[in-house]
Image (cartoon, helix red, strand yellow):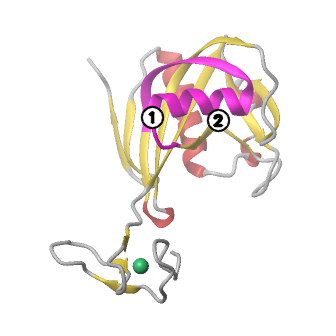
Amino acid sequence: MPHYCCRCGHHPLVRRVPDGDTHERDCCSTCGYIAYDNPRVIAGAILEREGRLLLCQRGIPPRVGTWTLPAGFMERGESVEETAHREVWEETGIHAEILTPYSIFSVPPTNELYIIYRARLLGWNDAPGHETQAVDWFRAEEIPWDAIFYPAIRQILERYIDEHAGGTYGIYTGSMESGTIHFMR
Ligand SMILES: [Zn+2]
């Protein structure tokens, strides 16, 4: 959190529960500004084509060289589906149709909410953006499991591979450690 008020520049901010509020916030005693620090939304997608899953390899720090699903922070003015679509486009050069939610999980330690959709390939025309070193489609047995940094992403891939075999996809909701898989009937 910033220690200076981003409205008037006063410092330090005071940690207290504002009148009528329920949580402690960083508050400016000069201008009354309250620095809310609510979770940030990260959206992305899992795409499959002929039994292969799309992964991208990080080209910028942190963790250059590790593989992950295309995903990134929601921008002001976007819907979460638009974020997932844009991130797939920016990180892989792929134009995707965003389908159903696949995994919605909170990460309280980093103050983040991840929303990963299933998506369908519509086409690809562009080279991946500068944040991506490489983009590739992997069969289950080809996935570079040791180079996937986030356990939650590994779990999404493992579950997708299992469910793909049966042709029915659930929706996970919970935290990165524990949650529930819901199946639509
Ligand atoms: Zn202030």
- Circle 1 crowding by C-alpha within 10 Å: few under 14, some 14–19, many from 20: some
SS for dot 2: loop
SS for dot 1: helix
Disc 2 and disc 1 in contact, CB within 8 angstroms: no
Q: Inspect the magenta stretch and tell me whether residue 81 lies in it.
A: yes
**Residue 34 position in % (x across, y down):** 35, 72
Residue at image point 38% right, 31% down: 171
Snapshot quadrant of residue 58: top right
Query: Considering only order in the chain, which callout, 1 or 2, is on the residue closer to the N terminus?
Result: 2
Q: Could you tell whether 131 is left or right of 75 in the image?
A: right
**Residue 156 position in % (x across, y down):** 54, 37
Labelled disc at residue 80: 1
Q: Could you tell whether 174 is left or right of 12 in the image?
A: left
Mark 2, residue position: 70
Q: What's the CA distance linking mark 2 and mark 1?
A: 14 Å
Residue at image point 82% right, 45% down: 59
